[in-house]
Image (cartoon, grey):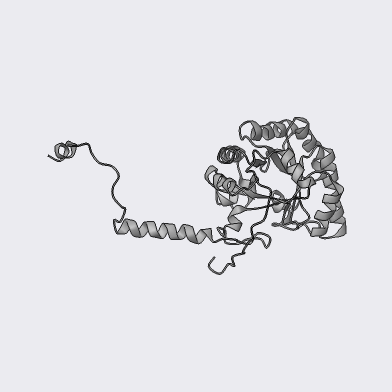
Amino acid sequence: MENQPIIETKPMNLPTCVDGPVTLRTLRRWSNANAKWAMLTCYDATTARWMAEAGLPAMLVGDTAAEMILGYESTIHAPLDFLITLTAAVKRGAPNVFVMGDMPFLSYQVDEASAIQNAGRFLTEGAADAVKLEVDGKWVDRFAAICNAGIAAVAHLGSRPQQAKQTGGYTTAGRNAEAAQAIVEDAIVMEQAGASMLLLEAVPEEVSRAVVKATTIPVIGCGAGTSCHGQVVVMQDLAGLTKWQPSFAKPTANVGNEISSVAKTWMNNVHASALGKHPYAMRDGESEKFQS
């Protein structure tokens, strides 16, 4: 991490959540006004609180928790109950932020009834404002059923990490005209099915631009270019906590080095018994009695 460049950023007047709760209506208003807005992944209340204090308006409790929190090499290992618990934690840490829960592998694919129930749990138990599903046009009926149940659902199109076993790894999407057109058509179908928003991952700028033009709902990009209304990446990538980052999420800080520094300082203090004045003392006269 020592060799990673730090990307300097300039302060800008960006949409934030400082004026009250951010809702789907808020994100739609910003998107309609072409005011770009930011989202980051988050998996715990403490980090959520700090990011909310920075003014971050939206957070995704992604199935990337399987990799970032549990140490797996793939997102398919994220347990449903685990993600719901994390989603609730993030919402407690940042109650005014728009929080999106990520439906993990096999939480909606098995049948319609379980898909609706599991999506609903993100709202009732996880306090999520919306749920995200990795889909394409073949899943429109299942997706529509979730929307018809009164659940705000986001259609994740383009590269879909939960399908990585079928492709031999993570891949980009929409790199030829036929594939690009299919993504645009899927976006239109998903909006018609009731999608509250769309998320495009790892697609060329031309595809994102076409999707934004063809639809009327907010479009979030993850490695999808600047045409999207919102942008989301994995926070650990930006913070310099991961060994590798995608080109669209290069570190803007080296938090990993800072954590190592904290650990080293603590170890040195422990070895030197340099822990400061002990804060707890026995009541007057009790020490003598105890040691007599």
Query: Which of the two residues, 77 or 242, is positioned nearer the viewer here?
Result: 242
Res. 285 in view: yes
- State the image coordinates of residue 173 (x, y, percent, origin top left): 78, 56
Residue drawn at (53%, 68%) of the image:
2
Name the side, left or right, on which 170 lies relative to 90. right
Quadrant, the C terminus: top left
Query: Which of the two residues, 17 or 240, is positioned nearer the viewer here?
Result: 17
Vertical placement of residue 2 versus 135, above or below = below
- State the image coordinates of residue 129 (x, y, percent, origin top left): 67, 37
| Quadrant of the image occupied by residue 209 | bottom right
Quadrant, the N terminus: bottom right
Q: Residue furthest left?
A: 292
- State the image coordinates of residue 134 (x, y, percent, origin top left): 73, 45
| Quadrant of the image occupied by residue 27 | top right
How many marks can you see? Answer: 0
Vertical placement of residue 279 versus 2, above or below = above
- State the image coordinates of residue 243 (x, y, percent, origin top left): 57, 61
Res. 109 in view: no
Residue drawn at (67%, 34%) of the image:
118
Residue drawn at (55%, 44%) of the image:
49
Residue drawn at (71%, 42%) of the image:
132
